[in-house]
Amino acid sequence: MLSLLLATALLLPGDTLTYSGQHQELDVQPPRLEDPAVRVDGVLGEEIWSRAAVLKDFTQYEPVEGIAASEPTEVRVLYGPEAIYFGVRALDSHPDQVLARLGERDRSVFGDDWIRIILDTFDDQRQGYVFYVNPLGIQTDGLWIEGMQKRRGSASSVSIDFSPDFIWESDGRVTSSGWEAEIRIPYVSLRFPEAPEQTWGLNVAREVKRKGFKQSWAPLTKNVSSTLAQSGRLVGLRGLEPKRLVELNPVTTGKRMGSMESGAFRRGDPKIQAGLNARYGITRNLVLDATANPDFSQVEADASRITVNERFALYFPEKRPFFLEGSEVFETPQQLVYTRRIADPVGGAKLSGKIGRTSLGYLGALDESPSSLSGGQGKALFNLVRLRRDIGTGSTAGILYTDRTMTQGGGYNRVVAGDVRVLFRKRYTLSTQWAGSWTSADGSSASLRPSIYASVARSGRTLSFDASFHDMHPDFRARSGFLTRIGEAVGTANASLTHYGPSGALLERASLALRVESYFDHDELWDGQGPYEAEIQLNPSFSFRGDRSVTVILRNGYFQFPRDLYQDYRVEGPEGELLPFTVPGPLETMKALAIMPRLRITNSSNLNGRFYYREMPIYAEAGRGLELLLAPRLTLRPTTSLSLSLDQTYSRLRRRRDDSVFSTALVSRVTSQYQFNKAVSARALIQYNLEERDALRDPRTGRPLHIGEEAVQATDQGTVQGQFLLQYEPSPGRIFYVGYTRLMEGQATYDPARMDTTEDGLFVKLSYLFRL
């Protein structure tokens, strides 16, 4: 009854254009007003809002699907010649518990209550603009991309690329009955078809964070794999008159760097650098970007990770604005485009957009990084081309070409690939990709080396599964992409059963997932041999009332050391002589237990973490190890403006042979941020990375191991990095900040007096975006 009364209280006396999500009234024709007199201040006091179309009767989709929302929501929609407007009223039975904090753009929403608007401006059910606001109007935005592979390093489990930034207006406020927000999205920030009458996909969702309840206007179900296919629609949009997109973004940076040289620490002279970014809208949906002498400075350092027992290169997400714009076009099942390979660009150009049913992208850049490609020298010239065609309802087919060529020596790497994604029977998805590479060190002709990928997936509320297979030739290379394993084939399969409790139950959801994964040497697979690495995991997971959950991993694994990696190893004999090293046999029945809790302690504190007790290979000495890993993270928001994050990762790896310690590693990171208002913030960060590793020993005899003629001795090393940043950012592209960073290296200790400063830097940046 209370929910009904609250919902009735939302409507105004003049409301006639109402659209009920529960009653499937999903085709919305909002009124067009020539001059909407809306001041975006978070107060829905203007009379004009009574003439707007009203979206009401939301339904919950998490944790209980299909029931009426416990906290009523109303969203009003109208549009004018240059922008579309949304007014939000989110009622709450306990308004004093609404989670609303000031925070940096794109970072604050996910700890707060929020409203999310998705606009599928091409109404093609493949990609949509995503706009989030929290109760104070803090913005987060991105692109919803159906079928997008979850990005490495991303905390999100949904198909959203949060990298892009759009220019739009929003404001909000907490009220005595919940909260309100106003949003204005100019058409110049969107891409849509060249047509006199528009139809856009639309859905609106809300989360009540303290409860973990998510609701949407157009009902959502996991029994349909495409979220955009479940949207409502904005119909009959006429007279849209966007300005032509013309942006100029001059950027000036200044820095003074210090470093250790010849045993002494010296600071260089101050350096000032100017650059220019530009964007031009050739059409409403085709944009040309260019940059000259760009500034690609990163405000915050990449989070360090434990590397003492790591076999593969670590992935770090792209953060540089020029590369992020339009990056969704280059998404493919295999990550054949990874723009951080362009380390130090002189300049670049990019063309991206959509013509009819075809999305296209081109990126060219000249990288003056001294790193070489297969022995080549000089600069590296990148050319990346992507075309993707919409087929039927929700399916796509595309091609990709990448070329990285050295300006001296003629070395090159070229990749051509084709991919298809097919959506059928609403819940099944088939994705495939075929790729071939040519790599030459001196510009001479090279042979084609293949790579293939295929996957099938079924979405479902109670039963879901997926399976994939990926095989690469040993000489396949993607120098413009990111592939952790080369010359291998991997097969994976996942299945999950989920049970949902009734509304209000303590246990809201329980699931049981099974994962099987096997790795093969490419040549051995096609010779009929078995995997060299495999594991099976059982993952029970439980979600409880109040946005709390725990996931358990039970694993049994198998691993065989590749013999060719240990060809240079020798064992020190009793008299100091060097004896041949014998690679041990396979490691069987490697057990593991992991617990991953996510606990909301109070409205202002959360504790998450990863806790592992697992057997694993010690790769450096081809032995069997037992690791204890503890990685808690405590997040505190004691006030509306202050946030604190404390991360601690501890790993101790012991040899199973004699229980001796092979390595100990600690990563400690403390981040604090104070948000003075929406635009001004200060952030401080300190991070320790401490690692100790024993001398390498033969896993059979325990005697010292040599690589070549040298014994591999124990190591003890530590680094500490500190950063401070004061930032003013009223909108994307308009920014001023001043910061200081220092890096110290030495022994594995928390005492900075036992470390030496090896680098430091004072830097400032001024950037202003002119939208003409």
Image: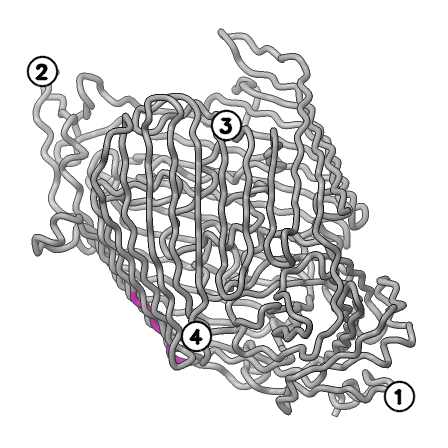
Q: Amino acid at mark 2?
A: Glu
Above or below 418: residue 42: below
Give the percent coordinates (x, y) of residue 675.
76, 47
- Could you give the CA–CA distance between mark 2 and mark 4, rounded to whole angstroms? 74 Å
SS at badge 2: loop
Residue placed under numbered mark 1 in the picture: 13
Q: Which residues are magenta?
A: 462-467
Give the percent coordinates (x, y) of residue 396.
42, 66
Residue at horizontal 39%, vertical 43%? Answer: 402
Residue placed under numbered mark 4 in the picture: 392
Closer to the camera in the image, 236 or 696: 236
Within the magenta stretch, is there residue 568? no
Q: What is the chief secondary structure element of the magenta stretch?
A: strand
Above or below 328: residue 458: below
Mark 1 surroundings within 10 Å by alpha-carbon count, few (fewer than 14), some (14 through 19), many (20 or more): few
Q: Which is more N-terminal, label 1 or label 2?
A: 1
Mark 3 surroundings within 10 Å by alpha-carbon count, few (fewer than 14), some (14 through 19), many (20 or more): many
SS at badge 1: loop
Mark 2 surroundings within 10 Å by alpha-carbon count, few (fewer than 14), some (14 through 19), many (20 or more): few
Note whether residue 92 is visible. Answer: yes
